Amino acid sequence: MNRFHYSWIILIITFFSIIVAGIVRSSSGVFIVPFENEFGWDRSVISLAFAISLFLYGLSGPFMAALIEVLGLKKMMVFAMSTLLAGVFLTFFMEHEWQLILIWGIIIGLGSGLFLTVLSPYVANRWFEKRRGLAVGILTASTATGQLVLLPVLAIIIENYSWRWAIGLIMVLSLIMLAIILLFMKNNPKEVGILPYGLEEESQEANLVQKKNPIVMAFQSLIEAVRVKEFWLLAGSFFICGLSTSGLIGTHFISYCISFGLPVVTAASLLSFMGIFDLIGTTVSGWLSDRFDNRWLLFWYYGLRGASLVLLPFALQEGSIILLIIFSVFYGLDWIATVPPTISISRQVFGIEKSGIVYGWIFASHQAGAAAAAYGGGLIFKIFSSYTWAFFLAGIFCVLGSLFVILIKKQKSDLLVKDDAMRL
C-alpha cells in the first residue's frame, strides 16, 4: 500500500467541496435581514424561499445517489458545483420575490443536493474499507462546518459594504472549487489503479456498473425500504434532526439573537463557533460509531440537543455572552453528530450497495424537517414577534427523536448483514 493513499486526496477534495456548498446554502442566514431591508420583502416569504431550498436539496438526495451510479462521481460533482455557481451569479440580478424563490429556493437547493446529502456516505463507502466510520465523520462534519464557519466574515462584509460583496466572495470560492474538482477528482479507485483504502483484494461487486434509469433505481429502493421498520424510525428521527439544526438554528439563530439586541457579527460568530466544534464532535462521532452501539449514541445526541435548545431562550433573555458561548460549544459538538451513526445503521440494515440511495431518502426526511422549521420559524415570529416557542418546540421534538432511535433493533456487524439486507 502506498504511503499516502489516493483515497485521502479524494477525501480532502470532497471535504472542501462540501464546505463550499455548505457556505453557499447556509449563507441565507445572514441575508434574511439585508434582503428584508433592501427589497422590502416579508420575512415569511424570504423564509419560504430558504425552506424550499432545504426541502429540495434533501429530496434530490436519492436521485443524486442514483445518478452517481449512472453518470459517475466526477461528472455529478462538476454539474452540481456549476449549478451552485449559476445560482450565486444570478443573485446579483434578482429584483422580485419570485426570483428569490427560483434562485435560492430551486437552483441553489438542487445544486447543493449532491454535496450535502449522499456524497459523504458514497465517498466513504466506495473509497474506504478501513477507517470508514472516521471518513464519514470527517465528511459529515464538513457539512455543518461549511455552513457555519464563514458566516462572521460574510456578516462583516455585509455590515461594512453590502450583501453583494458577500455574494462575490461566495462566487469566487465556488469557482476555485470547480477548478479543483475538474483537475483532481476521480470517479473510483480503479481509475487511478488502486483498491479502496484498507482493501487487499477486489470484489466482484466493485466491478458492477449500473445501467438502470436513475429515477427507477431511486423509487425501487424506496419501495423496498418502506417495508423495513428501521427505515421509518431513522427517517422520523432524522426529520427531527433537520428541524432542530439547519432548519431552525441555521436559518433563524442570527435573527433570534438580533431580536435580543446582539450585533449581527456577534450572532454570526457564535454560529461559526458552533461550526468549529461541530468539526470536532462529528469526527469523534464517526470514530465512536465504529466502536459502540449506534442506537445509544443517537439516543444521547438527541436528548442532549433537546436540553440545549430549551435552555437557549433563557441564555438570550439573560443577555449573557458566557452562557451563549457555552451553548455554542455544547450545541456545536452535537450539531450533526447524529449523521455517522445514522449512516452506519443504514449500511448495516440495507447493505453497502443499496444504502447510498436509501440514506438519500432518509436524508430527504431530514430536509423536510429542516424546511418545516425554516418556514415555521418565520411564521411563528410573524405571529408572536418572537422565536422562543419555535425553540421550545424543537427541544421537545428532540426528546421524541431520542425515543425513536432506541426502538431500532440492534444490528449485526457489516460483514454479517449482507444476506439479511432488505428483508422484512
Image: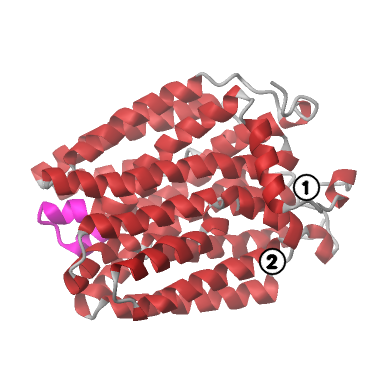
**Residue 198, disc:** 1
Eyeballing the image, is 219 above or below 104? above
SS of the residue at dot 1? loop
Residue 422: x percent and y percent?
A: 72, 28
**Residue 326, disc:** none
Mark sitting earlier along the chain (2/1) = 2
Quadrant into which the N terminus falls: bottom right
Q: Residue at x 42, y 53 (%)?
A: 54
Q: Residue at x 50, y 55 (%)?
A: 142
Q: Which range of residues does the magenta coloring cover? A: 255-268
Residue 374: x percent and y percent?
A: 32, 49
User: Does any portion of residue 301 appear in the rendered image?
Assistant: yes
The disc labelled 1 sits on which kind of residue? Gly
The residue pinned by badge 2 equals: 74
Judge from the rendering whether residue 25 lies leftward or rightward of residue 112; answer left or right: left
Q: Tell me the CA gap for discs 2 and 1.
A: 22 Å
Tell me if mark 1 has few (under 14), some (14-19) or many (20+) residues whose alpha carbon lies within 10 angstroms of its own: some
User: Does any portion of residue 336 appear in the rendered image?
Assistant: no
Judge from the rendering whether residue 266 lies leftward or rightward of residue 121; answer left or right: left
